[in-house]
Amino acid sequence: MISRRPFRRSVLPAAALALAAFSATPARADRCDDVAKQLASQIDGVKVTLKARNIVYLTHPATKEFSIGCRGQNYSLELYAKTDRKFKPAFLELIANAGAIVFTIPKPDVVTGSTRCMKRMGILRGDKVSMRFRRLNMECTRTKTESAIAVTRGKDE
């Protein structure tokens, strides 16, 4: 009669390791969903409305359009917001709060960069301004009725 003990000793630890490996990796939501939920919980008035592929659409009283984009061709995260042509301080405050959360940089840096970008649009520089501030790419545009800002961070940063 052959003892089964050596077989059990080798299989039992292997099965325990496999079980630990599979149970240790929790199911993760997309980074965009995590950031959108974080924005909705930390900023008053922000609500998640729609999720479509790589974009999460949000709403806020200070904006006409508000969204977060994930994994584009040249960027890892994008924050986009649109408001009236004459933007209000509440709009810049929202961009600063959202940018600080999305890009994990200090809020004063986002305030400075977004304010500079939005205020540079005009007669001398035109209706489309692109600038870089503290590893963030900012593109501000305006039409006769609306102003918009897109804040992105490159994939390599």
Image: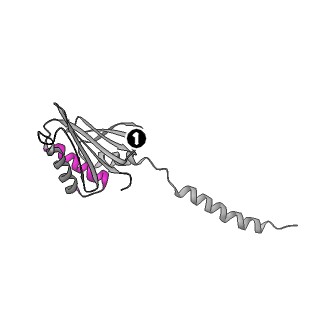
Quadrant of the drawing holding the N terminus: bottom right
Task: Return the residue nearer the eye: 13 or 95.
Answer: 95
Question: Is any atom of residue 60 visible in this view?
Answer: no
Q: Where is residue 84 in the image (x, y as percent from the top left)?
A: 17, 35
Identity of the residue furthest to the right in this view: 1
Q: Is residue 135 magenta?
A: no
Q: Which residues make up the magenta segment?
A: 89-106
Residue 9 versus residue 101 in the image, above or below: below
Q: Is residue 132 above or below residue 87?
A: below
Q: How many labels does the image show?
A: 1
Q: Is residue 9 left or right of residue 120?
A: right
Depth order, front residue of 128/67:
128
Quarter where residue 60 is shown: top left
Q: Residue at x 66, y 63 (%)?
A: 14
Q: Residue furthest front?
A: 124
Q: Residues within 10 Å of mark 1 (few under 14, many from 20)?
A: some
**Please, what secondary structure does the residue beneath circle 1 have?**
loop
In this picture, residue 80 sits left or right of residue 85: right
Residue 51 percent location from the top left of the image? 38, 37
Q: Is the magenta stretch mostly helix, strand or loop?
A: helix
